[in-house]
Each structure stands twice: as structure tokens, then as C-alpha cells.
């Protein structure tokens, strides 16, 4: 049975924090590959055009033999929901043990995702601690246990573990803010992503 981790996100744009997360998952688990899953129509978020987000993902991940990008969310109309994507991917990759890579901030909201309770038990969760405002690892663990209990109260089980990763304070929103403020984003994103953003004038007032 193959072992695959899905890394879902808006990737608006992809940054070094994302890349470190995916690489860490590959290092710490016996994974065959990481599938990057850009959300086509993310719930609750306005994002840059899908074609731009995918182009940046391609540039940032193309040199890594264990990274694949899935465009499966293009096949469904309406809002992109994680559970539908996992169901669709399971048809493409049968006989697979699934993992889902997620930052702590996102994992915290899992019980409120569309059919989040069902999704919770369909894969193993690989959680990256994320700086949300001063919490320690012990507090991060508490947050995960609260999610676990919330699900257990409704008779759903979840398997999760932390990825051992240094806290990286980079976020896509920070990068978008830096661009709007005319600050440099060099060393926050791969150089190929930085040049794509500048060539297409993304995240500035002149953006498409
Ligand atoms: P935004 O700032 O626009 O909300 P983001 O940086 O959180 O974006 P997403 O594409 O929404 O990026 O994130 C995809 C996944 O990666 C989420 O599970 C998120 O928690 C996680 N993630 C993103 N950046 C980091 C980081 N620096 N450390 C840990 N996890 C991260």
C-alpha cells in the first residue's frame, strides 16, 4: 500500500513555510509523495486567479521528485471542499494510506469544515505548530487534544501527530501585505515565485 500526504491550501502565494512543511513531512514519515492541492474556489477566502497560484506552485516544486500538484479541484463546480477532493483522489490513487498536512491554525477549525468529522477519520493528520500568538508546544498540543475531544464527543476518531519543525512566521497574507507596502519579499518565497509575482504584478493595485 502506498503512503501519500495531501497538502491542501490556497497558496496565495506559496512561500518557504509551505515548502519546509512538505519537506519535513517527507523526512519524518514513510511517504511516497506529497500531493499539493491548491484550492480552486476556497471557502471563506478571496484569492488570486487559480492559474497564477498554480503557476507559482509549479515553479516552486518542479525540482522535487516527490512533489506532485493536483488540479483535481477543477473538476468540481462550486466551492472546493477538502472531503470531495480526498474522495476524488482516492479514485485516482487506490490502495493508499492517506495523510493530510496542515498548520495548527487550520487544524483547529477542522470540526467546522464541510463534513469535517467524516474527513477527520479518513486520513492521518500531520500538524505543523504555527505561531498564533505566543503559545508553547504544550499549548499547541492542548489545542489538538481539544479538537480530538470535540470529535470524540460525536463518536468520530482522529489520528494526528506533530511535525517537528521550527516555527516559521511567514504567511501568504504577510507576503501580500509586504507587496502592497512595497517591501521586499526576497527570501520569503523562492526566487522563481518572486519573479513571477513581479512579472504579473500580483498583489499590487495593478493586479489582474
Ligand atoms: P494566509 O496568510 O493567506 O491565510 P497561509 O500562509 O496560511 O495563507 P495557506 O495556503 O492558507 O497559507 O496554507 C496552507 C496550509 O499551510 C494551512 O494548513 C496552513 O496552516 C499551513 N501553513 C502556512 N504557512 C505556515 C507556516 N508558516 N507554518 C506552519 N503552517 C503553515
Image (tube, rainbow, N blue to C red):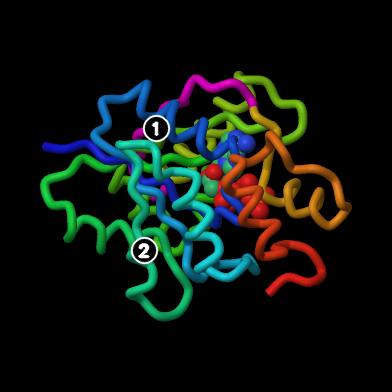
Q: Which residues are magenta?
A: 153-167
Image position of 153 with respect to 42: above or below:
above
Horizontal arrangement in the rendering, residue 190 relative to residue 37 (left or right): right
Horizontal arrangement in the rendering, residue 54 relative to residue 132 (left or right): left
In which quadrant of the rendered view does residue 206 lie?
bottom right
Is disc 2 placed on a helix, strand or loop? loop
The residue at label 1 has a CB less than 8 Å from ligand 1? no
In which quadrant of the rendered view does residue 15 lie?
top right
Q: Residue at x 24, y 34 (%)?
A: 32
Instruction: Say if residue 104 shows up in the picture.
Output: no
> Can you say which quadrant of the picture contains the C terminus?
bottom right
Q: Dot 2, crowdedness within 10 Å: few (<14), some or many (≥20)?
A: some
Q: Residue at x 56, y 53 (%)?
A: 11
The location of residue 159, given as percent across then percent down, is 34, 34
Residue 165 painted magenta: yes
Instruction: Say if residue 95 shows up in the picture.
Output: yes
Q: Residue at x 47, y 26 (%)?
A: 162
Ligand 1, image quadrant it occupies: top right
Distance Cα–Cα, label 1 vs label 2: 26 Å
The location of residue 43, given as percent across then percent down, is 55, 67
Amino acid at each position: 500500500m502506498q503512503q501519500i500526504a495531501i497538502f491542501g491550501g490556497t497558496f496565495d502565494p506559496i512561500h518557504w513555510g509551505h515548502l519546509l512543511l512538505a519537506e519535513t513531512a517527507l523526512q519524518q514519515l514513510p511517504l511516497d509523495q506529497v500531493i499539493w492541492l491548491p484550492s480552486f474556489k476556497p471557502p471563506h477566502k478571496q484569492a488570486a486567479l487559480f492559474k497564477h497560484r498554480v503557476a507559482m506552485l509549479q515553479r516552486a516544486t518542479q525540482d522535487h521528485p516527490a512533489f506532485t500538484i493536483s488540479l483535481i479541484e477543477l473538476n468540481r463546480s462550486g466551492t472546493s471542499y477538502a472531503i470531495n477532493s480526498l474522495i476524488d483522489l482516492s479514485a485516482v490513487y487506490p490502495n493508499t494510506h492517506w495523510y493530510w498536512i496542515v498548520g495548527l491554525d487550520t487544524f483547529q477549525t477542522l470540526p467546522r469544515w464541510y463534513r469535517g468529522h467524516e474527513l477527520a477519520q479518513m486520513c492521518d493528520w500531520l500538524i505543523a505548530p504555527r505561531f498564533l500568538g505566543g503559545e508553547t508546544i504544550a499549548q499547541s498540543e492542548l489545542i489538538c487534544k481539544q479538537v480530538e475531544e470535540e470529535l470524540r464527543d460525536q463518536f468520530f476518531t482522529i489520528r494526528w501527530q506533530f511535525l517537528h519543525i521550527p516555527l516559521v512566521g511567514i504567511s501568504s497574507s504577510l507576503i501580500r501585505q509586504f507587496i502592497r507596502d512595497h517591501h521586499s519579499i526576497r527570501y520569503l518565497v523562492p526566487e522563481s515565485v518572486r519573479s513571477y509575482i513581479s512579472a504579473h504584478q500580483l498583489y499590487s493595485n495593478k493586479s489582474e
